[in-house]
Image: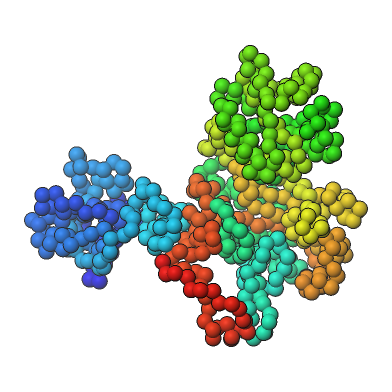
Amino acid sequence: MKLKRTHMATALLQAPLGESVTVCGWVQSRRDHGGVVFVDLRDGSGLIQLVMDPQVNPEAHTSADRLRAEFVVAAKGRLLERDADKINADRPTGRLEIKVDELEILNTAKTPPFEIDDDLNVEESLRLKYRYLDLRRPSVQERLKVRHRVTQTIRNYLSDQGFYEIETPMLIKTTPEGARDYLVPSRVHPGHFYALPQSPQIYKQILMVAGLERYFQIARCFRDEDLRADRQPEFTQLDLEMSFVDEEDVRGMNEGLIAHLFKEILNVEVKLPLPVLAYDDAMARYGSDKPDTRFGLELVDFTEIMKTAEFQAFASVAQSGGLIKGIRLEGAAEQMTRNELDQLRSRSIRYGGKGLVWFIYKPEGLTSPVAKFFSESELNAIQTVSGAQTGDIVIMMADKAKVVHDVLGRLRLDLGERFNLIDKTRWDILWVNAFPMFEWDEKSGNWLAQHHPFTSPKPEHIEKLFSDPGAVRAQAYDLVINGVEMSSGSVRVHNRDLQEKIFQAMQIPEEEALNKFGFMLGAFDYGAPPHGGMGYGLDRLVMLMTGQETIREVIAFPKTQAASCLMTDAPGTASKEQMEELHLRTVMPQPKAQS
């Protein structure tokens, strides 16, 4: 490489006109206009136009004839201002060009499978197979730059608040944290396995016992679980922990962090303190523990008035402890067709319900497929409780509380989109707290920790650990941004006696508890301080801040929803020698077909 870069493309905005400059980058496009060749050169900052004129340098012009998209070049020449009628107002450097007097082709390129252009609609599988080309697109690079700025801002803010960044191990002992572990066989300990951490939970609590008081880490985490838009088998988490704090202290610290991030990255002012919504209220009003509060459509409870209803399908559910709830759709009578209502019912079944019914309040009267099963007073009560007016539709369903909330919570989001009720320019950030300590698992027949078993129950609920586990509320809290769970945290257990009681309530045998958590229980015997913390999904945070639909768009090398890498063809098989070295024996699958 003979030519050495002097400027990035956008740095030329500050360079004096007429100065000799050298730029390097990729050929975005090439145009031949009557002998003069124009090239848009792309580097990490943007685009700059090169002009190869045979009158200026015949040799550079001859070389320009060879240029094709994605050739890597260096160009030296004079920086000039374009003619007024040639200025490109859509580009920061649109008034500038370089009259090239020396051109060096640093590398050629095959024709790429898709253009390196933000406006193209390229299938994701093709983008991921050629991820090194997809990463050249300016919008993709911009998202990764935002991610860099987010992590740098976090590090600086927390360091200023007295936190220390401390790394925790990647090879740990397997622990029950809600998802399957990725296991790593040990060569030197035959038959034994490490696990990749689902989170640094135990280690950050040990750091508090160790007296470090304020810890954070941008941690890599691993979960072997079924994937969706906002999940990956490996992901990044901001983890932090604080000693001698209660829930309000932790929330206050994190509110400051979030407000600082939104101001620095998006120039958005976040009003503090953030609103706090108890879990039970969130479920009752929105059917979700991560409610999107940018729009209404809150759930309406009809359970009480249905207990004596003539419609037995609803009355029996209400009398047996289930719920009858619905949503009032203002002004929807003229907007939703019968076919749409049928599709809504089908969707409710796909979401896990048994279907739903509707009441349409038209000027000529009430229309409903189930109206004949209700008395006039019951129909009046439905209208009164829902607040329905002429022109409205009320949808209703009956089932167990969990099913009703889950189905209506999802339908509420669908309907918010359908009626354009969601203000996409708005940021609604809130806390949801007072989560149930446990949730009943039908499969195992046990109470499982809803967050994790190291979450501390509310002090006044400790006495219910064995008598009424389902009523115990935890000192747990989630940060929710626009209906997305952004972070989750809790005040932790710091007392061995209480921790052992929680294991007993979950029916974890003493021997199993000692085998898996003995080191932690032992640490509690040596003066563990009260402590609490948070874990943020960093990928989700950047996804929201950059307006993307999936976290794959903000990860440099993401996996597919089948947890595979199309670029490297991972996962792959291991050789017989590797398997023997690790003391493993398995039925080897057939080699995957090469892409």
Name the quadrant containing residue 401.
Answer: top right
Q: Residue at (55%, 77%) from the top-left corner?
A: 588
Q: Is residue 243 left or right of residue 43?
A: right
Q: Total marks drawn?
A: 0
Q: Is residue 577 left or right of residue 435?
A: left
Q: Is residue 345 left or right of residue 89?
A: right
Q: Residue at (76%, 24%) from the top-left corner?
A: 373
Q: In the image as oriented, which residue stretches furthest toward the left?
A: 55
Residue 155 in view of the camera: no
- Above or below for 179 versus 418: below
Seen from the viewer's position, the closer of residues 13 and 134 is 134
Q: Residue at (68%, 37%) from the top-left corner?
A: 355
Could you tell me which quadrant the C terminus lies in?
Answer: bottom left
Q: Is residue 250 left or right of residue 113?
A: right
Residue 143 in view of the camera: yes
- Above or below for 324 versus 3: above
Residue 440 point in image, percent of width and height: 79, 53
Seen from the viewer's position, the closer of residues 560 and 515 is 560
Residue 577 point in image, percent of width and height: 54, 86
Residue 486 point in image, percent of width and height: 62, 50
Seen from the viewer's position, the closer of residues 580 and 469 is 580
Name the quadrant containing residue 109.
Answer: bottom left
Q: Residue at (53%, 42%) from the top-left corner?
A: 268
Seen from the viewer's position, the closer of residues 421 and 77 is 421
Q: Which color scheme is applied?
A: rainbow
Residue 28 point in image, percent of width and height: 28, 55
Name the quadrant containing residue 238.
Answer: bottom right
Could you tell me which quadrant the N terminus lies in?
Answer: bottom left
